[in-house]
Image: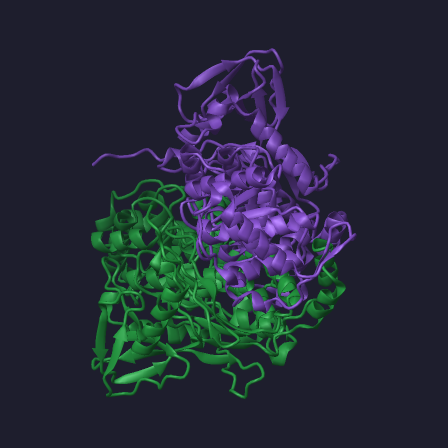
Chain colours: A purple, B green
């Protein structure tokens, strides 16, 4: 059902059966103007068909970590599969570039991505700095037009997937992780993308209905504080009947049943004195919600006072529901000391289990929310807590700890001539040539090092010793005897070549792959504190070539 | 032209002539699931038509500042004007909430926002914590459905507008500010919204073509490093002819003209020895770009070496263009020490002016980019620089210094009964009641204080002494004699009332209004370092009422 709805919502596209980009605003105009002015200058110089190769890569892992998850590939492929400027878009460009010749706009009208090749690391892979996530080859004018949309589609997707994966790592596999960020995301698409990529990075569900529909992601939600405070008291509840779960009987006054249970809890031996009068508008709200959703009653318990009102009120309703054959789902805490409150709530639940012989009540689900992030979850872990599920919003979706990933798009070859971008900052020097990239695995099954080679070099072989060099640091090099070799980039858009095109997997396949990749990494690369950098290298031949080109291009300084 | 294109691109919508939301993904499903589950619980309890009033406000100004600019209102109004769940959306909701009764989905199909009222502060206004930016009144189930989309549309819009305004304040009015953030924005809509709201907050132009088309914002762009390195040398230039600006003559070999000028510059008295051989692929790229855009030649000069290659190459091309009657536009620096390089470049330009009697060359435009933000511009100002225009991307559009604004949406009244949300954190206690809000101005024309009153209290009067109280701090209060009073919220969506509906102004009107408001603020509220908080208050009557309700609702503690 979910997958069918997702397919229906997206609609079929034009190019080779690949649907259009999820966001209809992703069109060829979603780019920087300079891509069009350069296209004109290339066209004027007769260079627009020059065959160019660009690498899309980032220079530094985000969040102080040593890994990144690659996201956004499917949207890039959808974009190029459907790349075509419409007449109204051309009209706008004419007005924006009034001095350009007509022939140029005719050329623009004619272009698509049929002669573009895209090689990429599979979406959801663990990736590292400097290794191209995507290699894009084609006519230079066309490829430039792809730069900004590709970066826009990859940068945030990869950043937020990585952030989600980091939250999963700190929370542990047993916890439920819920993404609640739509209201604080950077715009509606920020919210929808966040839901998609957080799921890919290991979250279990989202609150975002539109994302649920578009991508088939599980959606979750119960009620807010406003729901609780919208009730004045128990008199607000008009229809008080509840049929039992199996339909065999009917409770005519569920409100009284709840009130009876509340009185029993208050008098129960070990609970006596833990609370006095609970808030009755809260009790009315919980009861109402339970009447609407008897099968999935989950209560937000912190509108008034968690331990003196919210939790006892919840338990009364849960016990009344139990009488009618329903199992309550649990509570949510959205403020206060989450470690302390979750522990106290757990004690209360266990006391209910013991007092009333209600097996399993002690294990009732506790969800926590309220400005959670990696640090706060880590702190909760250290303090000890009883939270089963985390609802995470702002810090997750806006990537508050680092709001941007700096992917770049660099020319590495034109008309088979290698190009290098120099910089006084060595980390900004680009690695020239169309390349091949491999991941080498060691004896224990962990990835050891990524290596880039020239396009025509032989692939690394299992069991054969290979020299891996740091691309810029002469002294850093190591011999590796790989036990397993994986070529990293696959062909996702073959252009006019005859290479088979990789299929775009479903979001659930990408998510499983991502979880699998994370599991395969050596733990010291993944830890939060002082993680070990994963090694990225070049072949000896590529190393020599980089440094030959570099010396060739760099001006000789003159001290004065 | 731009306005017409913008109107055409948006398309007319349904509700009262108000167009649909700019992003087609903004639909009633772009909300949290709990809004729908609560709607069902309200419906089940027969409470869904209860008349509720919600305030949308934030609690703290962003970026360590003491002001915020309100953005996103137009999109909220577009959203409600066109609010209607489609049959396919209802089908999806049925699948997501399988236990809900049919009657509920019939109700959902029937709802629109015709009985909703929206009062708001005009978009582009300077606003402060706790004062509602919007007051939304209507059937509680409907208003809840608006919560998440409104927050999603307002939070980022206001945040990035404020960020843009802060960049404008630090850069000063004389500088050109260009938004270059699309590639690093949080998703495509993040990019498009950023371009729109940065313009609103005081930027002059964007690189984002789609935003230019959608909103009629000026667009700017020239070329990238890849353009420069795509040239191998001067032989790449096939067509070397250039007609003069007035069409009176033609240069058959513009490349030679450039080369001649380069030789003359190298030999010019005061410039002799400042550079040796410049990079010829760079010279070829500049010459090509000038042949394509002789009227607007702007060169990125840092691909190889700014002072020894980029700037001399630019000057040679600019002088050659001048021979043909064209005026070059300037240079862009995208790396290195921008203060130093801009000063050195300016000296070089002045030397050209003197050596060749080229009046005005010394004032040639210098644009700087490369990870700029408020801090780096402030540092440049302190060091002294010669930059005329700043191109700002990542830090601006992702609001890197604070990636989210925490607007909330709180129930303040239901069926005419005031509601308060308590919290152990006083800053999180909500201010109950449907309110009116005023800005009071002092003798010097500056705003002095914002005051909230109950709906039925008389408006503050010019010349009449009024007690303004801090809403939560008993001891903070002050008498004010306003010289001018402005009611802050106006009616943007009258629902079934007969109030006239405020028009939605054009983006340029909002931008001018925003600049005007910023100019009217007392400078100490606006400064970067230790700004003075602007005062936000309540009337004596509202103060008393808040505290009466608070004591009524809060449980009495018990120390054990």
B354 sits left or right of B67 in the view:
left
Q: Quadrant of residue B28?
A: bottom right
Q: Position of residue B536 (x, y in %)?
A: 31, 70
Q: Quadrant of residue A8?
A: bottom right
Q: Position of residue B181 (x, y in %)?
A: 46, 54
Q: Quadrant of the C terminus of chain A?
A: top left
Q: Nearer the viewer, residue B556 or A399?
A: B556
Number of numbered labels in the structure image: 0
B70 sits left or right of B139 in the view:
left
Identify the residue shown where x is 39% and y is 18%. A475
Q: Is residue A536 visible?
A: no
Q: Nearer the viewer, residue A61 or A163?
A: A163
A395 sits left or right of A80 in the view:
left
Q: Nearer the viewer, residue A27 or A96?
A: A27
Q: Position of residue B148 (x, y in %)?
A: 54, 61
Identify the residue shown where x is 66% and y is 47%. A322
Identify the residue shown where x is 55% and y is 67%. B213
Q: Is residue B459 above or below residue B548?
A: below
A284 sits left or right of B311 in the view:
right
């Amino acid at each position: 059902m979910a997958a069918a709805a997702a397919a229906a919502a997206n609609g079929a596209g034009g190019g080779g059966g690949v649907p259009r980009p999820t966001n209809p605003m992703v069109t060829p105009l979603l780019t920087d103007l300079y891509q069009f002015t350069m296209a004109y200058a290339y066209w004027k110089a007769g260079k627009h068909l020059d065959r160019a190769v660009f690498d899309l890569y980032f220079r530094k892992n985000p969040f102080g970590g040593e890994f990144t998850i690659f996201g956004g590939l499917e949207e890039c492929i959808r974009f190029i599969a459907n790349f075509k400027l419409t007449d109204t878009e051309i009209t706008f460009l004419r007005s924006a570039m009034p001095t350009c010749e007509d022939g140029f706009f005719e050329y623009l009208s004619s272009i698509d991505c049929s002669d573009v090749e895209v090689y990429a690391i599979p979406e959801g892979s663990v990736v590292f700095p400097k290794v191209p996530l995507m290699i894009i080859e084609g006519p230079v004018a066309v490829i430039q037009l792809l730069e900004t949309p590709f970066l826009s589609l990859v940068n945030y997707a990869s950043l937020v997937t990585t952030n989600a994966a980091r939250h999963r790592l700190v929370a542990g596999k047993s916890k439920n992780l819920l993404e609640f960020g739509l209201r604080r995301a950077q715009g509606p698409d920020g919210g929808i993308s966040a839901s998609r990529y957080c799921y890919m990075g290991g979250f279990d569900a989202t609150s975002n209905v539109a994302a649920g529909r578009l991508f088939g992601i599980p959606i979750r939600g119960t009620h807010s504080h406003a729901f609780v405070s919208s009730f004045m008291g128990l008199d607000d509840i008009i229809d008080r009947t509840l049929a039992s779960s199996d339909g065999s009987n009917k409770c005519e006054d569920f409100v009284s049943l709840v009130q009876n249970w509340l009185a029993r809890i208050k008098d129960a031996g070990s609970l006596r004195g833990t609370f006095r009068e609970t808030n009755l508008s809260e009790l009315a709200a919980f009861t109402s919600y339970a009447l609407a959703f008897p099968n999935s009653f989950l209560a937000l318990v912190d509108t008034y006072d968690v331990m003196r009102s919210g939790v006892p009120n919840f338990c009364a309703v849960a016990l009344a529901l139990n009488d009618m054959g329903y199992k309550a789902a649990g509570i949510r805490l959205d403020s206060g000391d989450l470690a302390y409150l979750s522990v106290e709530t757990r004690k209360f639940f266990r006391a209910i289990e013991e007092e009333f012989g209600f097996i399993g009540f002690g294990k009732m689900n506790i969800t926590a929310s309220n400005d959670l992030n990696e640090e706060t979850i880590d702190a909760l872990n250290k303090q000890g807590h009883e939270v089963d599920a985390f609802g995470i919003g702002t810090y997750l979706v806006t990537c508050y700890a680092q709001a941007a990933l700096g992917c770049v798009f660099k020319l590495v070859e034109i008309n088979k001539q290698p190009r290098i971008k120099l910089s006084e900052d060595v980390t900004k020097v680009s690695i020239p040539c169309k390349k091949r990239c491999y991941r080498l695995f060691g004896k224990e099954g962990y990835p050891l090092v990524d290596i880039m080679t020239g396009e025509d070099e032989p692939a690394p072989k299992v069991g054969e010793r290979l020299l891996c060099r740091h691309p810029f640091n002469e002294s850093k090099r190591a011999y590796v005897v790989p036990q397993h070799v994986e070529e990293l980039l696959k062909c996702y858009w073959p252009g006019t070549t005859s290479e088979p095109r990789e299929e775009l997997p479903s979001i659930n396949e990408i998510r499983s792959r991502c979880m699998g990749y994370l599991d395969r990494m050596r733990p010291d690369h993944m830890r939060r504190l002082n993680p070990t950098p994963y090694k990225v290298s070049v072949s000896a031949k590529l190393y020599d070539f980089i440094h030959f080109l570099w010396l060739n291009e760099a001006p000789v300084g003159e001290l004065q």
